[in-house]
C-alpha cells in the first residue's frame, strides 16, 4: 500500500527528512564528481612520494603548489620534520649574511671551497656527537619560498659525509641562506 | 544574479568533491589504491555525519601502526593498494609488541581499561578515511592528534579522547565544506508543490514526469532556490522523495531505535540509523563500480566512454525505471545544462554563451537510445569474447558458457551443434577485441584469469540492465506520442528555460 504524506507522523517526517537529506547530498557529490571539470592538483600524497622516492629536487609544479597553498606548505614542513632524524633550524634572526657553516642537532654542515677544482665546493656533513647507527642517506634543504632541494649522501667516513658540487648549485645557494632549514634522514 | 549565484553555490562543496575524487582516483601500481566500496563508505559516513565510530577505530589502528618503522605515516603509505589481505600480511610479518596481538581476523589492542579490536576487513575503509582526512583537514592538524597515540602506555579512554578531537576537527571542516542542504526548506518546497498540485495530500504516485518538469520550469526560472537550478537535481530530488516515501515503513522501524548522542527533542535522527536506511533503500551494488576494482579492473571490458554512457543509469538504479522519461530528459538535457554551467565557469558569455545555450543539446532521445543499444551490443560481444578466452584458458568448461549468452537465445539445454556454433561466434568476437586483458599473453597473469571469473558476471549484469531498460523505454507511454516527437516538444521547453536561467549573462 502506498504511504501518503499526511499519514506520516512528525517523527517519521523527521526521519524522512534526514534520509532525504543524506541521499540528495550523496547524489549532489556523485554528480559533481562526474560532471565538474577535474583539475589535478599537487596533494600531500605527492609530497610524501617525493620524500620516499629517489633523491631529486622538488619539481617546479610542487614548488608552485607550496607557494600557492599555505596549508600544503604547513603539511610539507610537518612531513619533513617528522621524517628527519636530524635537523638544523633556521639561523638566528641576526644572521643576515651568507653562511658557510650550519649547526644542527648532532651534526655540523660546512661548505669548503675545493683547492683542486675551482668553482667547486665540498659539502661536509660532520657528526659532532655519537655516530649514528643508521647513517643518513638524504639531505633536504628547505627554503621559505617553496624552494627545496634533496641530495643523496654517500657513506660516512670518520663521521663525515662529503659531496663535491658546483659553487652555484641550488643546494649550496640554499645552505648559505640562513632562512633555510636542513633535514637529514 | 542567478548564474553567478549558481556557480558560487556549486563551489561551496568543491573541496569536498575534490577530496572524495582524489580518494577514488588515486592509483597504486595501475589499480585503484582504495577499493570503490571503501570510497563509497567514506562518502556515506561523511554525508550522514556518521563518522565517529570509524574515527575511533582509525585512532586505534594509528596506535597499532606506530610500532612499525616510520610510524603511521609510513605504515599507510607502504601498504600499497589498500586491501584487507595486504593488512593481514603487514601485521602478520610485523614486529612483536605488547600494544596488540594479531588474531584470526584482525588485531586485538591491549589496554588496561578496555580491549579494542580492529578487523582486517575494516582496515581498507579506515585507510581511505585517513587519506580523505589528510586531503580535507591537512596533515599537520591530524598529526597533532595522531602523534600522541604513539605513547608507550595509553588507556582506551585516552585513545577515545583523541578520536573525539578528530571528530571535532572533521565536524568543523564539514561545517564549511558540506554544502548547507537546508533539507527542511528543500523538502518543504517539493512537498508544498505536490500538495498544491494534489489539493492537500499526496502519495508517491503524485511524483511523475510531468510534475518533475513543471516544478523545474517554475523553480529554476523564478525562485531563489539554487538547490533546484538544474533539471538533474530536480529529477534526483523527486526520485529520492519517492524512495523515502516508499520506504517510510522501514523508517518507522528506525524510529523505535534509541539515538546516541543526538537531540531527540529537537527532532534529530541518529546518523547511524540514517546510514542503515540508505543501505536498505539503496540499489544493489553498482556493477560498474565493482568493475573498477581488481581483479576485474585488469581487463578493459568497458572503456571510459562506454562507462560514461551508462554511468547515470546505474547511479540512479530503480529511479530510472520509476521515472524513465525524466531520466532520459536528465541524460539528454541535464547533460546539456551541465555544458552550459561549465561554460559559465570558464568565463563564457555574450554571443558564445547564447550559442552554447542554443546548441547545448548534442544528442536527441533517439540517439541516446541508440547509444545504449550499441553499448548493450558491445556488452554481448565482450561476453562472447570472454567465453572464448575463458574456455581456451581452461577457466570454464563448455556447459557453463550457456548463461553468458543473450537471454533470448539461451534455453534450458544446449546440444553439441549449438555449442559449436556458439564457440565459433565467441571465437570471432574475441578476434575483434584487442583491449587490455583480451590479448593472449595477458592470460599468463593469474590476476587477469581471476579478473575474468569476477568480471564476466558483472559485465552480464551491466548488459542485462541496459537491455531491460531499453525494453522499458520502448514500452513507456509518452505524452508526445513517440520518442522523436517527445524530443521535439521537450527541446522547445528546455531551450526556453535555459535562456530564462542563463540568458541574463549573455
Image (tube, coloured by chain):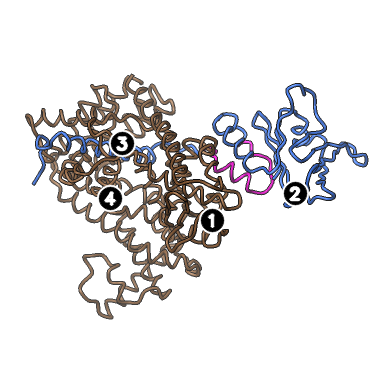
Question: Which contiguous range is marked in magenta?
Answer: A41-62
Question: Reading the chain from its start, which is encountered first: label 1 or label 3?
Answer: 1
Measure the C-alpha gap from mark 3 to mark 2. 68 Å
Q: Nearer the viewer, residue B410 or B447?
A: B447
Residue B86 seen anywhere in this rendered image of the structure: no
Image position of B191 with respect to B283: above or below: above
Colour applied to chain B: brown
For label 3, the SS is loop
Quadrant, the N terminus of chain B: top left
Question: Reading the chain from its start, which is encountered first: label 4 or label 3?
Answer: 3
User: Do the CB atoms of the residues marked 1 and 2 lie less than 8 Å apart?
Assistant: no
Q: Nearer the viewer, mark 2 or mark 4?
A: 2
Name, please, the residue furthest toward the right: A116
Q: Nearer the viewer, residue B68 or B212?
A: B68
Residue B114 is inside the magenta segment = no
User: Do the CB atoms of the residues marked 2 and 4 lie less than 8 Å apart?
Assistant: no
Image position of A94 with respect to B133: above or below: above
Q: Which residue is mark 4?
A: B370
Q: Which residue is mark 3?
A: B361
Q: Quadrant of residue B56?
A: top left
User: Do the CB atoms of the residues marked 1 and 4 lie less than 8 Å apart?
Assistant: no
Measure the C-alpha gap from mark 1 to mark 4. 63 Å
Q: Which residue is drawn at the image coordinates 48% and 60% (left, top)?
A: B102
Res A132 label: 2
Give me the chain letter of mark 1: B
Give me the chain letter of mark 3: B
For label 1, the SS is loop
Residue A46 is inside the magenta segment = yes
The crowding category of the residue bearing disc 1, from other C-alpha atoms within 10 Å (few below 14, some 14 to 19, many at least 20), is few
Quadrant, the C terminus of chain B: top left
Q: Which residue is mark 1?
A: B98
Amino acid at each position: 500500500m502506498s504511504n501518503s504524506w499526511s499519514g506520516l507522523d512528525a517523527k517519521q517526517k523527521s526521519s524522512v527528512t534526514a534520509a532525504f537529506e543524506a541521499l540528495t547530498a550523496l547524489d549532489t557529490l556523485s554528480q559533481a564528481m562526474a560532471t565538474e571539470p577535474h583539475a589535478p592538483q599537487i596533494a600531500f600524497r605527492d609530497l610524501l612520494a617525493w620524500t620516499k622516492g629517489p633523491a631529486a629536487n622538488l619539481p617546479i609544479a610542487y614548488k608552485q603548489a607550496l607557494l600557492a597553498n599555505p596549508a600544503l606548505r604547513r603539511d610539507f614542513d610537518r612531513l619533513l620534520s617528522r621524517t628527519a632524524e636530524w635537523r638544523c633550524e633556521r639561523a638566528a634572526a641576526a644572521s643576515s649574511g651568507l653562511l658557510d657553516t650550519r649547526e644542527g642537532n648532532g651534526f655540523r654542515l660546512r661548505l669548503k671551497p675545493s683547492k683542486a677544482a675551482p668553482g667547486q665546493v665540498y659539502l661536509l656533513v660532520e657528526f659532532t656527537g655519537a655516530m649514528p647507527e643508521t647513517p643518513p642517506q638524504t639531505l633536504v634543504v628547505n627554503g621559505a619560498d617553496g624552494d627545496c632541494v634533496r641530495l643523496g649522501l654517500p657513506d660516512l667516513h670518520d663521521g663525515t659525509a662529503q659531496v663535491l658540487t658546483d659553487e652555484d648549485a641550488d643546494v649550496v645557494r640554499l645552505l648559505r641562506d640562513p632562512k633555510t632549514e636542513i633535514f637529514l634522514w | 544574479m542567478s548564474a553567478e549565484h549558481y556557480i558560487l553555490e556549486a563551489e561551496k562543496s568543491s573541496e569536498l568533491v575534490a577530496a572524495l575524487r582524489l580518494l577514488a582516483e588515486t592509483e597504486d601500481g595501475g589499480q585503484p589504491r582504495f577499493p570503490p566500496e571503501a570510497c563509497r563508505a567514506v562518502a556515506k559516513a561523511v554525508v550522514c555525519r556518521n563518522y565517529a565510530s570509524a574515527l575511533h577505530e582509525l585512532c586505534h589502528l594509528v596506535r597499532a601502526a606506530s610500532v612499525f618503522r616510520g610510524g603511521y605515516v609510513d605504515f599507510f603509505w607502504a601498504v600499497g593498494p589498500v586491501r584487507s589481505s595486504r593488512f593481514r600480511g603487514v601485521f602478520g610479518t610485523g614486529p612483536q609488541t605488547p600494544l596488540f596481538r594479531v588474531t584470526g581476523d584482525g588485531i586485538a589492542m591491549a589496554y588496561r581499561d578496555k580491549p579494542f579490536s580492529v578487523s582486517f576487513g575494516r582496515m581498507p575503509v579506515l585507510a581511505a578515511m585517513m587519506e580523505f582526512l589528510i586531503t580535507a583537514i591537512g596533515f599537520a592538524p591530524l598529526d597533532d592528534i595522531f602523534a600522541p597515540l604513539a605513547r608507550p602506555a595509553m588507556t582506551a579512554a585516552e585513545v577515545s579522547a583523541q578520536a573525539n578531537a578528530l571528530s571535532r576537527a572533521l565536524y568543523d571542516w564539514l561545517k564549511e565544506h558540506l554544502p548547507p542542504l537546508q533539507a527542511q526548506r528543500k523538502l518543504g518546497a517539493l512537498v508544498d508543490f505536490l500538495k498544491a498540485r494534489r489539493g492537500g495530500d499526496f502519495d508517491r504516485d503524485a511524483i511523475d514526469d510531468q510534475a518533475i518538469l513543471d516544478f523545474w520550469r517554475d523553480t529554476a526560472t523564478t525562485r531563489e532556490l539554487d538547490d533546484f537550478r538544474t533539471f538533474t537535481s530536480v529529477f534526483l530530488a523527486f526520485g529520492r522523495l519517492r524512495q523515502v516515501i516508499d520506504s517510510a515503513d522501514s523508517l518507522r522501524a528506525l524510529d523505535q531505535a534509541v539515538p546516541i548522542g543526538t537531540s531527540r527533542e529537537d527532532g534529530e535522527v541518529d546518523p547511524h540509523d540514517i546510514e542503515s536506511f540508505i543501505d536498505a533503500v539503496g540499489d544493489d551494488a553498482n556493477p560498474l563500480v565493482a568493475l573498477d576494482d581488481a581483479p576485474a579492473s585488469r581487463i578493459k571490458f568497458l572503456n571510459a566512454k562506454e562507462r560514461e554512457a551508462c554511468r547515470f543509469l546505474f547511479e540512479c538504479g530503480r529511479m530510472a525505471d520509476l521515472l524513465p522519461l525524466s531520466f532520459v530528459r536528465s541524460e539528454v538535457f541535464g547533460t546539456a545544462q551541465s555544458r552550459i554551467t561549465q561554460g559559465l565557469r570558464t568565463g563564457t558569455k555574450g554571443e558564445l554563451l547564447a550559442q552554447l545555450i542554443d546548441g547545448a543539446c548534442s544528442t536527441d532521445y533517439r540517439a541516446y537510445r541508440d547509444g545504449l543499444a550499441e553499448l548493450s551490443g558491445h556488452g554481448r560481444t565482450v561476453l562472447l569474447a570472454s567465453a572464448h578466452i575463458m574456455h581456451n584458458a581452461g577457466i570454464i568448461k563448455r556447459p557453463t558458457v550457456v548463461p553468458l549468452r543473450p537471454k533470448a537465445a539461451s534455453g534450458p539445454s544446449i546440444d553439441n551443434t549449438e555449442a559449436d556454433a556458439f564457440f565459433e561466434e565467441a571465437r570471432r568476437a574475441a578476434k575483434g577485441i584487442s583491449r587490455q586483458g583480451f590479448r593472449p599473453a595477458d592470460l599468463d597473469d593469474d590476476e587477469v584469469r581471476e579478473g575474468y571469473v569476477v568480471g564476466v558476471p558483472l559485465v552480464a549484469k551491466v548488459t542485462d540492465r541496459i537491455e531491460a531498460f531499453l525494453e522499458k523505454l520502448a514500452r513507456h507511454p509518452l505524452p508526445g506520442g513517440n520518442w522523436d516527437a517527445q524530443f521535439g516538444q521537450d527541446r522547445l521547453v528546455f531551450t526556453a528555460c535555459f535562456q530564462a536561467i542563463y540568458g541574463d549573462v549573455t
